[in-house]
Amino acid sequence: MATYHIDDDAEAGKVAVPRRYAWIVFALTFGLLISDYMSRQVLNAVFPMLKGEWVLSDTQLGLLSGIVALMVGLLTFPLSLLADRFGRVKSLALMAALWSLATLGCALAQNYEQMFIARFLVGVGEAAYGSVGIAVVVSVFPREMRATLSGAFISGGLFGSVLGMASGGVLAHLMGWRWAFAGMALFGLLLAALYPLIVKEDRIAQANRTSKGCGGRNPLRSLYSSRSVIAAYVGSGLQLFVGGTVIVWMPSYFNRYYGMETDKAGAAAAIIVLCSGAGMILCGMLSDRLCKARPDHKISLAIGYCLGSCALLSLAFALPVGVPQVLLICLGMFIATGTSGPAGAMVANLTHASIHGTAFATLTLANNLLGLAPGPFITGKVSDHIGLDKAFQLVPLISIAAAIVFLYAKRHYHKDVARLEGEQQPQAADAPLIDPAPTEARA
């Protein structure tokens, strides 16, 4: 049977994972990520109904949405660290069950206070899923596929957001807003029940099986001990400043400058979101395909993605409104999000495999603090003074700063990878090799 040999991390030993099983793990983990974002974003589809039924203000509605993002930001790192220590598969199943049950609680809420508590619990359940989920995924595939997997996995958030708003709107229109939440909850609970039955801790090439007694060294140091991994965090966050800002403000841009109604503006913006998601996947695949022999070349591609998106988006927002502008925005956003794959691969290659969940949590934190959170806010402030169209002409320039940071990472990448491998070498000498035969036989 065809297998993937997971032998790139010295402390993990020699592990063979059947290819079919690896892709099943990916599909289930990716499916839960989509459920995560569907449960998070379905609220946006039913805002008008909640506002009318409970006589809510826009501030109250905003709090229902913002409390999820707040809890994710506060709890991503500590919960990822706990998952790395106590078992990623079990932790993912518990997270999914919690956010799904909390989403069901939203469907049953009788007033604003109950809805707020339920949304709070949705945020707690979703807090560490993205970072721990991608750590599970990269553990069952070879090193040379990490950019593809990172880009594809992260794109699930965009696809889940679109599906959550679209399917939630349909369910709310046909059956009422409560069924919109209930539909998301039932989908999540089904996957949460299947996940631990199929994905087994002892069948994935998870390095912390063999990383006990790491030669007296603290693997957590690898989160921040190299210049290139810090640059990966910063470069990824800066580039997402551009992508996140355009996604948030595009509906308003279409409404103000193209004269579109709210529903049409949202649909047009959704197309750009889908282009961004496709870019994450395809640019990650391109990085892996072109850079098998030289992983550091992925950083060169990330630099190219930054500069290419800067050029395309700058040109797009300098053009008058029309089809050419929209096409250039779609192409620019396709490339702008392409850095997600190379950045994720860098983080995986530059940190100890036993704390990959925590490492991706750190990347998520940087993406939010440097990009997704300040980008829309700063752009809104600038827009108040000079207009959204002029503000959009300035946003792509942040990509130049991201390219400079990735260039700095490229200069130190080989040295930092060699140092990490040297630190892990004593552990590898003591750790027994894991015989791939039993894994293949079980498949």
Image (tube, helix red, strand yellow):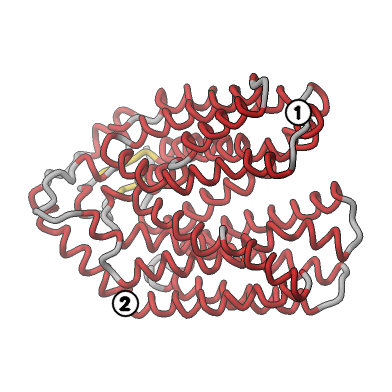
Q: For mark 2, give the secondary structure.
A: helix
Relative horizontal placement of residue 426, taking residue 418 as reference (left or right): left
Relative to 427, is 24 above or below?
Answer: above
Taking the spot 31% from the left edge, 28% from the top edge, the residue there is 442
Looking at marks 2 and 1 on the same chain, the residue that comes earlier in the sequence is marked by 1
Q: Nearer the viewer, residue 437 or 359?
A: 359
**Distance between the alpha carbons at the discs numbered 2 and 1:** 56 Å
Residue drawn 66% across the image and 64% down it: 333
Q: Is residue 165 left or right of residue 185?
A: right
Examine the rendering and report whether any part of residue 266 can be seen.
Answer: yes
Type of the residue with mark 1: Trp
Q: Quadrant of residue 294?
A: bottom left
* Residue 72 screen position, x and y as percent: 48, 44
Q: Quadrant of the C terminus?
A: top left
Reading the image, the residue beneath label 1 is 54
Q: Secondary structure at mark 1?
A: helix
Quadrant the N terminus occupies:
top left
Tell me: 31 left or right of 391.
left
Q: Residue at x 88, y 69 (%)?
A: 322
Mark 2 residue crowding within 10 angstroms, few (<14) / some (14–19) / many (20+): some
- Residue 412's tag is 2
Horizontal and vertical percent position of residue 357: 36, 47
Residue 67, relative to residue 325: is it above or below? above
Q: Amino acid at mark 2?
A: His
Left/right placement of residue 319 relative to residue 134 reads: right
